Amino acid sequence: MAVKADLGVLIVANLKVVFFASLRETMKCDELELPVEGTLTVRQLKEKLAEQLQQPLLLEEKVKAAIDFDFARDEDLIEPDKVREVAFFPPVTGG
C-alpha cells in the first residue's frame, strides 16, 4: 500500500518481491513484502535484500530480475508507486 502526501514527501510502499527456482530454496521463501521509500534501482534493491536476508548470492551478476513481468537490468528504476512486483531468478529456469 502506497502512502502519498502533498509536495515533496517520499512515497512509502510495500514492494512485492518474488524468488523463483533455486533462489526460493536459497532465500528460504517464495515471496516477501519489503517497505521501500522513494525510487531505487534493481541493484539497490538487490543490495538491500542481500543485507537484510544475509544472502550475498543476490549480488551476483548472474541473478536476473523482472519488474512487473518485464526483464530488468541492474540500473533500471523501481518506482514504488508504479511497480507491483519485482522477481529474481537464476539465469536458467526450467518448467
Image (cartoon, rainbow, N blue to C red):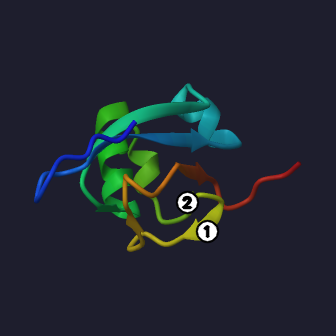
| The N terminus: image quadrant | top left
Q: For numbered disc 2, what is the local secondary structure?
A: strand
Identify the residue position indicated by label 2 in the image: 65
State if disc 2 and disc 1 touch (CB < 8 Å): yes
Q: Report x, y in % for residue 50.
A: 36, 43
State the residue position of label 1. Answer: 71
Most distant residue in the top direction: 28
Instruction: Say left or right for 62 vs 15.
Output: right
Q: Residue furthest right?
A: 95
Q: Is residue 42 left or right of residue 27?
A: left
Amino acid tagged 1: Phe
Is residue 28 depicted above or below 84 in this figure?
Answer: above
Q: What residue type is disc 2 on?
A: Ala
* Residue 59 image point, x, y percent: 40, 55
Percent x, y of residue 84: 52, 49
* Residue at 40 percent of width and 39 percent of height: 55
Residue drawn at (89%, 48%) of the image? 95
Residue 6: percent from left, percent from top: 14, 52
Instruction: Establish if 36 lies above or below 30.
Output: below
- Residue 7 found in image quarter: bottom left
Label 1 sits on a secondary structure element that is strand
* First of labels 1, 2 by sequence position: 2
